[in-house]
Amino acid sequence: MSETPHREATRIAALKPNGPAAAAILAAGIGSFVLGLLTAGAEAIPALKTALTWSAPVGPLSGKTGVAVIAYLVSWLILAILWRGQGIRFEKVYTATLILLALGLLGTFPVFYEALAVKP
């Protein structure tokens, strides 16, 4: 009798730890979400826009990308430590990553973040 695809995938995951790879993928979604959140937030909160201006010629983009990269690296480190040597259900990681990527992308669309902008 052959195994169901789900049972076979579970068995393979138990044999081959995928925790570090899953951590890197989910961390990419987290970093993208943070970038979208900061992009929209900087338009809605003038103090945040000022705080994210790490380099005057670049403007708040320097802080937005810097914080997003830091969020990616920190979440990758934490998840990689927590999931080291484990077989993670990749379907859940994949779904969460896609949702975070979609939300992060939404936050970077001018139509979305300009609607949140504080009008002078």
Image (cartoon, grey):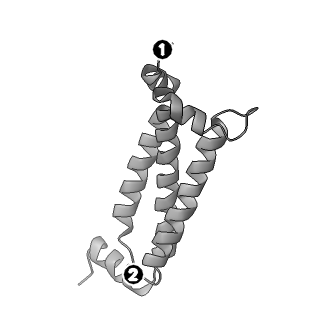
- Give the mark toward the camera: 1 or 2: 1
Q: Does 98 appear above or below 78?
A: above
Judge left or right: residue 49 versus residue 78: right
Amino acid identity at mark 1: Lys
Frontmost residue, 117 versus 81 = 117
Q: Earlier in the sequence, mark 1 or mark 2?
A: 2
Q: Does 108 appear above or below 98?
A: above
- Give the residue displayed 39% in from the left and 62% down from the top: 93
Please indicate, yes or no, whether residue 110 appears anywhere in the rendered image.
yes
Residue designated by label 1: 119
Q: Quick one: quadrant of the N terminus? A: bottom left
Frontmost residue, 99 versus 49 = 49
Which residue sits furthest top? 120
Residue designated by label 2: 12
Which residue sits furthest right? 57
Query: What secondary structure is marked by label 2?
Result: helix
State the mark number for residue 45: none
Circle 2 packing at 10 Å, graded few (<14), some (14-19), many (20+), is few
Q: Position of residue 39 (x, y in %)?
A: 52, 35
- Give the residue displayed 57% in from the left and 62% down from the top: 73
Query: What secondary structure is marked by label 1?
Result: loop
Amino acid identity at mark 2: Ile
Please indicate, yes or no, whether residue 18 appears anywhere in the rendered image.
no
Judge left or right: residue 54 versus residue 82: right
Q: Position of residue 101 (x, y in %)?
A: 46, 46
Q: Quadrant of residue 87?
A: bottom left
